[in-house]
Amino acid sequence: PQRRIVWGCEYPELLLTETAAWHDRRVKDTSDETPPDMDENDSGEAAKRAIQDDMTGMWIEGDASLDQYRIPQGSAFVELYCTRSYLEDSANNPSAVLNAFPKDLYRLAPGNNTAVLDLERMSALPGSGNVPYPVWRMAITEAHEMPQSPLGLSNIRLNDQAMLDSLSFRPEKMSMLHNQTADIDIERIVWFTRIAPAAGTYEANKVFWNRSTPAFLRPGNYAVVGPRPSTEISWGVGNTNGSIQQINLTGTTISHRLNTQAVNDAPAINLPALTIVAQTNPPSTWANAANPDRQIGFNISEPFPVNTGYYPEPNPTNLPRPNVPNDAYSSPHDIPFDEAMNADGDPVSDLFIDLARVRQGALPLETGLVQNFKTVFLQRLADPALGWNPEPPVGHPANQPHANGYQPNLPVNPYITVDWMPMDLTVFNGEDDDRAHPQEAKDANIVFDPQDQNPNATTRFRTRERSERSDRPSGDQNIWIQNSFVNTAPVNSTRNEDYFGFNLHHTFGALNSTYWPVPATPLPTPMEQFVSRGLTNVPMQPFPWIVWNNRPFVNQYELMQVPVSSPSRLLYEASTDNGASPYRFNRPARNPQNPPNQNALSYEQARAPFRHLLNFLHSDEDAGDAPNLIRLFEFVETPSPFAGTKEWLEPASFAWTTGTPPQVLAQADSLVAAGSLDLETRENLESLVAPMNHVYAFRNPGLVNVNTITDPRVLDAVAPGLPWADFVAGRQGTRNNLSTVPSAFSQPFRSTLASDLSPLPAGERAPTDTTLFRTDQGLQLANGGPPNGNLGGQQGKPQPSEDPLFDNNHNEVFRNSERHSYFKNQDLRRLGNLTTTHSNVYAVWITVGYFEVLPWNANDPLNTAAIPTPDLAHPDGYQLGRELGSETGQINRDRAFYIIDRSIPVGFEKGKNHNVDQTILLERFIED
């Protein structure tokens, strides 16, 4: 029943641009843990003596593990960017402002006339479970089996030609990947809305939701999703007030207080951004579950807080020690929660298991970075107006509900993946280290923390940023491309006041560092360098433009700008000009004996030069060698804006139909079912129901025939910028040697279906080269140069060159045609509704003269007694001689003038005149 559903691709309003996650184990050397120290070697806090483990031979310090002093804390941050132009909301007319944006995604900001992306919008209709669902959400996967994103990030895999039209990046549809036998489990979900999941919400126990600011994001601005209003990184040594380094999310500002203050470095960096604090409720069994301080912040490393399997509730008290933090345990637990088992032998956290699987043999909880630990998917409801209802699994009866949330009584409306990005995890212990250990007990063989043998090693405490690298060698900045930038350089510890003394390197709320300008004199710190230049979200070079008209098409050539990517592949495939020629045909001559795949079109040819667009210019006479997509334009057009180009049908002529168009079609279906209406008539009716009750008259007034242009001023009027000399030469087939071509119009602009019509075999062309998008191959051949190769396996036909004849592309920054597909051949594409290659109405002057006919002999043209010798110019072997009456001066010539309209349908049969004279609108005989 769902076989005819196609998920359309929409403009990517929102992107994932930066991610970060870390996990603070918060373990400490204490002397009053619960249960009491089973090794009986504790002699007080920071006063353990070394012993050697009998089983491993490892030197440890008395207790076999540190103690769980505070509840472990995971933190995750995700930055999002609204891709619309921030200049679009500057008008003072609210209606006009909102009309520039999709109304099912945008709204007017409360209190002003600016348009904002409504991230907290809920579906207007209920979905699965009879509850509404948010239009936008983020889905976090489970930990990956291998240290990589589930997609492998491999061009070999993602560019597999067998997968291009089917592979989806939706986590519930990942089974089409090679060697991927199961879908990817979604472990946790983030809602931007301030509404908690209602009873009946599918997987409500996985949701973090907004606890802070209204999620209205202005175009061109950033949103940062974080775990809590204030997130401390580590704990200060001897500090009773927490860490010096903090990240604070306060409404429209993200503030990062560094744990060091170098020269010219501000104590805190404040950047404008919409901040969203995403949290979920703690286990209901906690005594203080309703306390706002007990809410669980957004993370990817803690177990999800259900009643079983989560950490015990903190119970701080000033006894037996002073300055106990609010999230500490009055009696620390002897075995840390993030290790495999707790004191009772039960698993507490799956972090140990996940890290053991990902790190593959290393100590799971050692300090350091784990790349591609999990993946975040940015998703949007396919139809924002409908509630969420996923597709049923393959083979499942469509009339039965399914455990995945599918409800047969609701329209199918899944979440479509818009973007995705890997998430790295930094693991550390910010509560204690070995610096306070008595000097006399220190030894190289002693391990202070059995789970972390080198806690003071340098590490990469940086965010993962969306990368700018494009397909061009110059590395143009491209915000659409889905590669992410991982700076592997370690970050050195900045000070000793924090147990984990590393500043987080990030650009939350600002342009990613990969897009930053390079100043003449570098400033002390990267962030200070960036902020001091007054830039927060403006790149030095405009980002490439994904063309999205969202309006009626102007002409058929605008189809060349429609992305061919699926919704979840668009950002992966979006590219700048990769330098490949769309005309290139770089393989040997087609051999019919070869297997089909050896002659197949390559990925680069199909998607040159922009990977997200179809290549309409690659053509060949052999349909097996090229798709010849340019022939599509022979069958599609946009309606003419002129009156008289349509014949309107009277709706009342369908006397048996009443009501709205859907009601009319429903009546037609009933008649088909009853047998009183045939299916073909029903299908024809569907295309003629009002307001489409018209047929075209096949008249297109107002178009200029490019083959009849004789004045450069006319060409400049319709196509300014096209060189007149190239235009004429392209139509002639040569620049300056007419003797090499049959006529001055050897290569007229014509239908692609007539590419092989030529008086000489060498004049046959590939379909593209009959259009305005032709290459300069014809000129190369006509000027005596050798053919460029083999086209379609036929010798003598030149291979298309890599340069268009009318190369009118641009290199200015604001309209660079190598970065913005819109400006690639822009001046040619606009001619679709301005020019034509045929004319309907002709003004015809005819002059008839009378001549002698003489035999023709190419070797002796003046010998009129020679035997007639036919050739290309004289197919019957005769030539014209003197005009009759030229000797007496009594020359007789008959002249006439006609206006002929060939759009009038008439019959044609060679040698007979049925009704051809009906095409003559005006006839005049001119008398001398």
Image: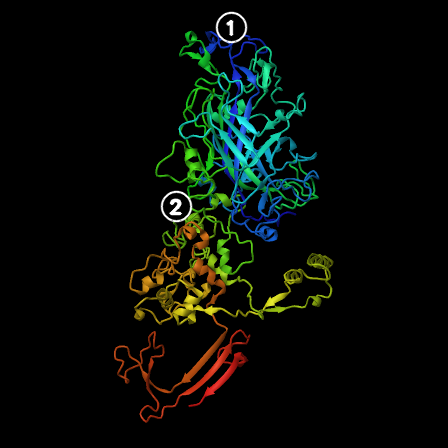
Nearer the observer, 836 or 3: 836
| Residue drawn at (49%, 79%) of the image | 899
Does residue 91 appear in the picture of this structure?
A: yes
| Residue drawn at (35%, 66%) of the image | 725
Among numbered discs 2 and 1, the one appearing first in the sequence: 1
* Quarter of the rendering containing residue 732: bottom left
Instruction: Relative to 379, say whether 53 is above or below.
Output: above
Q: Position of residue 593 (x, y in %)?
A: 40, 52
Q: Helix, strand or loop at disc 2?
A: loop
Residue beneath disc 2 = 472
Q: Is residue 909 left or right of residue 673?
A: left
Q: Position of residue 442 (x, y in %)?
A: 42, 10
Q: Helix, strand or loop at disc 1?
A: loop
Of labels 2 and 1, the one closer to you: 1
Q: Is residue 480 left or right of residue 386?
A: left
Please identify the quadrant where the C terminus is shown: bottom left
Nearer the observer, 589 or 703: 703
Amino acid type assigned to the residue bearing label 2 in the image: Arg
Amino acid type assigned to the residue bearing label 1 in the image: Ser
The residues bearing labels 2 and 1 have C-alpha atoms spaced at a distance of 64 Å
Circle 1 Cα neighbour tier, 10 Å, few/some/many (<14 / 14–19 / ≥20)? few
